[in-house]
Image (spheres, coloured by chain):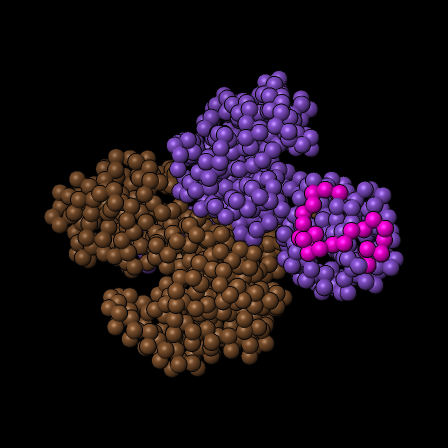
Chain colours: A brown, B purple
Amino acid sequence: MGTEVREAALRARDAARVLALATRTQKDAALTAMAEALVAGTDRIVAANAEDVAEARAEGTPENVIDRLALDPERVAAFAGGVRDIAALPDPIGEIVRGSTLPNGLQLQQIRVPMGVIGMIYEGRPNVTADAAAICLKAGSASLLRGSRSARRSNAVITRIMRDAVASAGLPADAIQAVSAEDRSTSTDLMTARGLVDLVIPRGGAGLIRTVVEQSTVPVIETGTGNVHVYVDADADLDMALDIVINSKTHRTSVCNAAESLLVHRDVADEFLPQVVKELQGRDVLIHGDAAFQAFDGVDAATDDDYATEYLASEISAKVVDSLDEAVNHVRRFSSGHTEAIVTRSLEAARRFTMGVDSAAVMVNASTRFTDGGEFGFGAEIGISTQKLHARGPMGLTEMTTTTYVVTGAGQTR
Amino acid sequence: MGTEVREAALRARDAARVLALATRTQKDAALTAMAEALVAGTDRIVAANAEDVAEARAEGTPENVIDRLALDPERVAAFAGGVRDIAALPDPIGEIVRGSTLPNGLQLQQIRVPMGVIGMIYEGRPNVTADAAAICLKAGSASLLRGSRSARRSNAVITRIMRDAVASAGLPADAIQAVSAEDRSTSTDLMTARGLVDLVIPRGGAGLIRTVVEQSTVPVIETGTGNVHVYVDADADLDMALDIVINSKTHRTSVCNAAESLLVHRDVADEFLPQVVKELQGRDVLIHGDAAFQAFDGVDAATDDDYATEYLASEISAKVVDSLDEAVNHVRRFSSGHTEAIVTRSLEAARRFTMGVDSAAVMVNASTRFTDGGEFGFGAEIGISTQKLHARGPMGLTEMTTTTYVVTGAGQTR
């Protein structure tokens, strides 16, 4: 391991010990100071970001990626506001998760405590730098932030501003540290800093996440990939189904909870397909369909690759199924385990679908776009876990913590 | 990946879908049938085990390892009884972990659901085969069991008996499968069966656990290594301290919650060291001590290696510290994060110690031997997690599950 990550992690561990004992008042003061400093530092942030954007343009980066990278005063104000919102959330640390008195008189308490040091490996958007640092700090953990090379100047300035603010509020600046993003080595070092880093969370595209999952020896929470299905059941209210399909697919196409695949029960296909094809195509959504969908002009033939693809674009795969079971089996085969939806009036169909698929969230008669920490009322979200270990679905502050058992006795032995 | 693990995992996934929908009544019937069949099959199990033991002896295996491998009717009855005990535990599946109605009327429920397919990689004791299969089944998951080569005949017979019993109770036999243990390939295959296996739990020595943690791409829960400390504070009741040290070290030396290191505050060293050295040595415990301990006959000099060692034997490292902070720092440096104990009358010392160390369990005035699923009242234990992700400390049935969000609406869109 290179010295940079090692030394940063050791400083982070020391900072984490202080943070673990910090009161909510102290942490919220630091977060408020961070939010104010980010707003006050808008010009510096935007200027550094302009250099990142200019370099990205010179390198021929596509404009949609540039848009994710670019900051203006409104965007800075938005993520500063996000930091302030995190200050307003309850402190997860110290919660007694369970407790009991054992038969021998021992008092058992399971107490929520911080993770320690959390590594974030992320792409693109520099707002993640502020989000992640603030969530980790509120959860009592130090953060090691490894953003993308393309945003390195923006991230450096944002991090410097937050560190100074944390120090001004009396907590250790090393609770928030950026590691350099010039090459892959710091990313690899973070993933393999077992014993120094307690958790690594990748945020970004499928390629980044796969790399982290495969290479990391530090525990990882996999986030974000969403090959999301909407199943329109034989008993669906078809007007509702149309609303939900259109909203799930077109409300925002680049997000992980957007629908990528449509399954329609054969009993309602004759009535529903003309409507849904018209509405999707009217919104410039390209349909990759099975034979039934291909009966409509402009529908491409779907392959298994289509069914497996998270388009993150105005495209959708589509298929008619003979039964709810076929829908469930299709979802189990192709889904990334993020979110699925069923539209039905049947309680039994809802039950069989929700128990049959194996995903982090299942919507019954609601848009897939609701799988979101904010929508769920968690107040802050570090990502959406698609794995089953530790956290599944939107991760809020609670999911960024661990627990410890404290057992108090009066000399008990076995 | 070899075909064996792949095909076993695919069969396990199918079985897991059935198990996930099985009622508690069905699962308990299968567990009861397993317990009865194990008792009825005692002769077959003991006969197969005798061959394993004979081979191990012929290969020159030490007698203490042979003892872990060997089964007799009492030991079979004991693990069959363990399976019956698991039937008596509440079913964790279906618990509503949290629920609320969101401002837009969506009804949010976080529901406890099975993991799916759990891989167990373990050494030695064939009783783990029955324990692990039973716990996984009760938690609604299929198990892929990869025991040690030395116990392969015993494990094969135990597995066959359990599979037949599960089938006789109307659940799929493939809910429990042993994978061959002739070479390392099946172990490697299990660890890398990402997408087919949801969780891998290693149980065994530090070497096995390290290998699984480093090589696995499937999420892992690290269990068991216990470099466990007892700290005798300046404010300790020294009679209580002596009881706790002796019990923690000598009650059973080969277990992960046995004490491996003793820290004594300098203020009580003059009084306490003669007593504790005498009592430990009187029980044939070899002390590896610092200068203060070396003043006593028969005490070896402790190195940093000693402080880092989990002896699992009648040995202990020992050191006098100048302060509680020094004790905490020593623990943070050398502990494996399993269990620590403080003996003190001081509320403030207890608070600083419990908040200062970073371990799965902290005992205040109690033996370290209490970190145990049975002692904690969890009823069954698959191991003791020393990592922070997902589960920390003794893992019972709840820790073998995950959750899913079910969101029910009436056509809500964003």
Q: In this view of the protein, can residue B23 be seen by the observer?
A: no
| Viewer-side residue, B52 vs A74 | B52
> At 39% across and 68% down in the image, what residue appears?
A182
Point out residue A236 in the picture as x, y percentages from the top left corner.
29, 43
> At 55% across and 32% down in the image, what residue appears?
B148
Q: Reply above or below: A90 against A346.
A: below
Q: Residue furthest left?
A: A297
- Left or right of B228: which side holds A230? left
Is the C terminus of chain B in the top left, top right, bottom left or bottom right quadrant?
bottom left
- Left or right of B327: which side holds A358? left
- Left or right of B90: which side holds B270? right
Q: Reply above or below: A89 against A338.
A: below
Q: Which residues are magenta?
A: B292-314
> At 86% across and 48% down in the image, what residue appears?
B278
Point out residue A171 in the picture as x, y percentages from the top left corner.
58, 73
Let me know if residue B383 is in the magenta part.
Answer: no
